[in-house]
Amino acid sequence: MPDKKGIQGILRKLPAVDQVLKWPEIKRALGSYPRKLVLKAIREILDERRKQILDAPDTSEAKTHADDILPDILKRLEKLSEFTLIPLVNATGIIVHTNLGRSLLAEEALERLELISSSYSNLEYDLEAGQRGSRYVHAESILCELTRAEAALVVNNNAGAVLLVLNTLALGKEVIVSRGQLVEIGGAFRIPDVMERSGARLRDVGCTNRTHLRDYEEAINENTALLMKVHNSNYMIVGFTKEVPLQDLVELAHRHNLYAVEDLGSGSFIDLSQYGLRKEPTAQEAVECGVDVVTFSGDKLLGGPQAGIILGRKELIARFKKNPLTRALRIDKLTLAALEATLRLYRDFDVATKRIPTLRMITTPMEELTSRAVRLKGFLDEVASTKFEFVVEDNFSQVGGGALPGQNIPTKVVSVTSQEYSVASIEKMLRSFDPPIIGRIEHEKYLLDVRTMSEKDFDIVRSAFARIAR
């Protein structure tokens, strides 16, 4: 092992940045990449080599050679130039996958995005009056048409919607909520925490599994601002349970001159029980119950872009618009464009289930799934049957996105096993492919769920296994 003087000698053999810039391959790279990025790649690799030499001096001589350094610089340069947000194949069977971007947008929404983003628009311009207008009018009319609400407001997400409603209606006052509805949503954000930030004070009533109307009534006092119902869209309480129907909660609130608010979480316009799924409350039903305000997400079950939708009485929506928080929570023109295009599809529910990807995947019949799984297996057998075994099997998909918890949807998967590769290595190879392929592992099998895969995904998966087999 070299002594300290020897290590310093090895370090001096590392090329300087100026020397590396003169290498022919680096000169060519400067023609394709910004100089700043090339310099960053060179410095990072040279810094790493210095550390390697200091950490393992007995094996460090070769680490100073140009033919050993150059490939790492070029590889790092390629890595630095990549986008961090990239498309991938969702073969997990989780339709609204929070980690994989939630809902896919309908073609109509994508077309509208391209149109609005590539031209100026009347985002905040009243064409009739010839003066400044409001961005919130663009989705309001279609929301009121679909739900029969008096007025509507859209902000950047549902947590923001809840924050805005509570801050406007209950600042410094109490909000009564059932203890069994104090949910934690994605990213460890909790309803009590959102409520605290809004300036409202939580008053939880009842027990985790059972809450009665009298629990709400006994908690009402001169400091009470509203009664709130939070739909448990991302968990289930089963067994000896009871919760107060929204209609009863509304009547109690109005009898005491209080507001009644419901947070639907995922939110939906279509009764999914007609497709064999568990009944979920719809936004229309909440409005019909006479609730003062209802909030829900624009993505997830609705199948649009991320947004927080607020429906309610006209005078309350007007108050929300005047709250300074609305400025911080406002949505941009692209969200509005995609949301309005998605909502227009709901004018015909049959069209919505066919055109909105989330609904289309939820309602895909088993016959079609079987046909697609058989076709995918055939593609894979053609290119990789010598190293892998592909089998079409019955399994279950999930809606995901905090919607319909515990609801399994029958599906078809193509299971992948191999005598040559472990299941973990198959998962890693596919996850490292470009574009990445994300499936799931069950019972020592790698599964590709065709419910969440498109036809173009089949070609990507086929190419990945063909490359692995070679």
Image: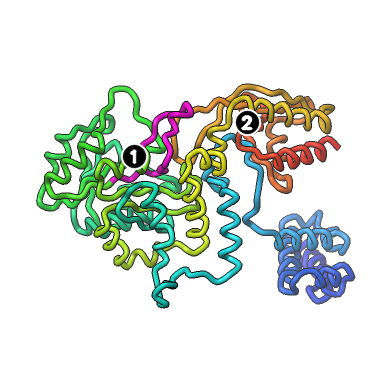
Residue located at (36% from left, 37% from top): 281
* Range shown magenta: 262-281
Asked if residue 144 is positioned above or below residue 179 in the image, the reply reads below
| Residue that label 2 marks | 441
* Main secondary structure along the magenta-highlighted residues: loop
Residue 213 occupies quadrant: top left
Label 1 packing within 10 angstroms: few (<14), some (14-19), many (20+): many
Give the residue type that dot 1 points to: His
Q: Foreground residue, 285 or 68? A: 285
Nearer to us in this view, 454 or 185: 454
| Quarter of the rendering containing residue 49 | bottom right
| Residue type highlighted by circle 2 | Ile
Residue drawn where x is 81% and y is 54% of the image: 59
SS under mark 1: loop
Q: Position of residue 118 (x, y in %)?
A: 61, 67
Quarter where residue 390 is shown: top right
Foreground residue among 59 and 336: 336
| Vertical relation: 208 (above or below) 161 | above
In the image, residue 243 above or below residue 80: above
Q: Which residue is mark 1?
A: 231
